[in-house]
Structure formats: C-alpha cells, structure tokens
Image (cartoon, rainbow, N blue to C red):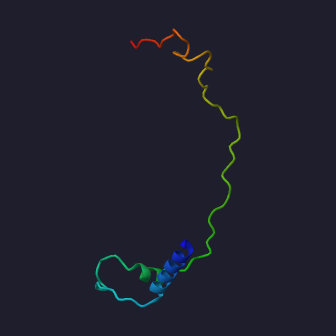
Amino acid sequence: MRALVATALAAYLALTAVAPHVHLEDPGSSGHPCAVCVSRIGEVATRATPELTPSPLVTGEVVLSPGLPPVAGAPLGAVPGQSPPVPA
C-alpha cells in the first residue's frame, strides 16, 4: 500500500512539474517565485570538486582529566541501621 501511494505521489509531482501552469501574481511583483519555475531555470550542476583532503593528523599523547575516585562499599542506606547523612 505504501509503495502504491508513493508511486502515485511521485507521478503526481512529476506531472504537475511538467504541465504548464498559470501564475496568479504579476510577473514583476516582489512576491516569492514559483518553485517549479525556479527549478526549470536553475543553473546546471558544475563539475567543481569539493576539497576532500583528510584533516591533518594530530600527533601527541592525549591527556584526559582525572576521573572520580573508585567507589568502595555499599551505598548509604543499603545496610540496615545505616542512614544517609543529615543535610546541613
């Protein structure tokens, strides 16, 4: 069903882009241009190649900040009779 709907929408879009259409605004108005007309007169793609060189490799040792000390023992409140500290 999805494939049928997608095919129908693609065919509708292609036919509306190819079919002649009428603009309701004046051609000299400062409104937004028609998307179909803009795509028809768009510039042709050039063969300009983007810069694909790899980024420079940074050599050296990575220094990380020291982490928290390891936790030992049971958490507060896990042992019967032990309660969490009273907030000051």
Residue at 43% over, 81% down: 36
Near-viewer residue (15 or 65): 15
Residue at 66% over, 61% down: 52
Question: Could you say which quadrant of the image residue 72 lies in?
Answer: top right
Question: Residue 64, position in %: x, y?
Answer: 63, 31
Q: Is residue 33 left or right of residue 41?
A: left
Question: Residue 75, position in %: x, y?
Answer: 56, 18
Q: Is residue 32 left or right of residue 14?
A: left
Q: Is residue 21 visible?
A: yes
> In the picture shown, does residue 52 fall above or below 56?
below
Question: Residue 65, position in %: x, y?
Answer: 60, 28
Question: Could you say which quadrant of the image residue 63 lies in?
Answer: top right
Near-viewer residue (77 or 46): 77
> In the picture shown, does residue 52 fall above or below 79?
below
Quadrant in which the C terminus is drawn: top left
Q: Is residue 41 visible?
A: no
Q: Is residue 79 left or right of residue 29?
A: right
Farthest bottom residue in view = 20
